[in-house]
Amino acid sequence: MIIVTTDFVPGKEVKELKGFVKGSTVQSKNIGKDIIAGLRTIVGGEISEYTEMMEATRKIAISKMVKDAEEKGANAIIGMRLQTSAVMQNASEIIAYGTAVIVE
């Protein structure tokens, strides 16, 4: 599956639009990671526990979007975007979305 953030795939021609596709997941914080992250805020620096958690969550959302595109018969997704929102205290949603297309 080709995934691009642009409205076209360089060197390819969009032959057919398959429509909007998305994938989302909601991730809550882990109490153990929360404690470690709290300690890290005292000394400063990257909170790698959250960085790793959000990276894994993005991968899940993207894989769900790809599955949606494959089910529509697409071989590419153009205009892909990621968005995050808080759905409740200590939980965030990541959504990946774009336009499924067939390119040649």
Image (cartoon, rainbow, N blue to C red):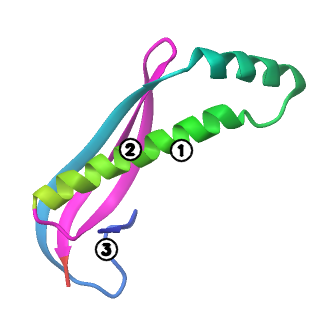
Crowding near the residue tagged with mark 3, few <14, some 14–19, many ≥20 C-alpha atoms within 10 Å: some
In this view of the protein, which residue sits in the foreground, 80 or 63? 63
User: Quick check: is 82 in the magenta stretch?
Assistant: yes
**In the rendered image of this protein, does residue 92 appear above or below residue 14?**
above
Give whichever of 60, 89 is nearer the camera: 60
Would you place residue 3 above or below residue 25 in this image?
below
Q: Which residues are magenta?
A: 73-102
Is residue 12 rendered to the left or right of residue 88?
A: left
Q: Which mark is residue 55?
A: 1
Q: CA distance from mark 1 to mark 2?
A: 9 Å
Question: Which x, y percent locates residue 46?
Answer: 76, 37
How far across and how far down the image is residue 88, in percent?
43, 13
User: Which residue occupies 30% across, 64% down?
Assistant: 78
Of the image marks 1 and 3, the number of the one nearer the N terminus: 3
Label 1 amino acid?
Glu
**In the displayed structure, would residue 79 be above or below residue 84?**
below
Based on the displayed image, in which of its 4 quarters is residue 98 positioned? bottom left
Residue 32 falls within the magenta-colored stretch: no
Q: Nearer the viewer, mark 3 or mark 2?
A: 2
Residue at image point 19% right, 58% down: 69
Which numbered marker is on residue 8?
3
| Residue 40, numbered label | none
Q: Which of the two labelled residues, at mark 3 and mark 2, occupies the earlier sequence position?
A: 3
Q: Residue furthest front?
A: 32
Q: Earlier in the sequence, mark 1 or mark 2?
A: 1
Where disc 2 sits, the SS reads helix
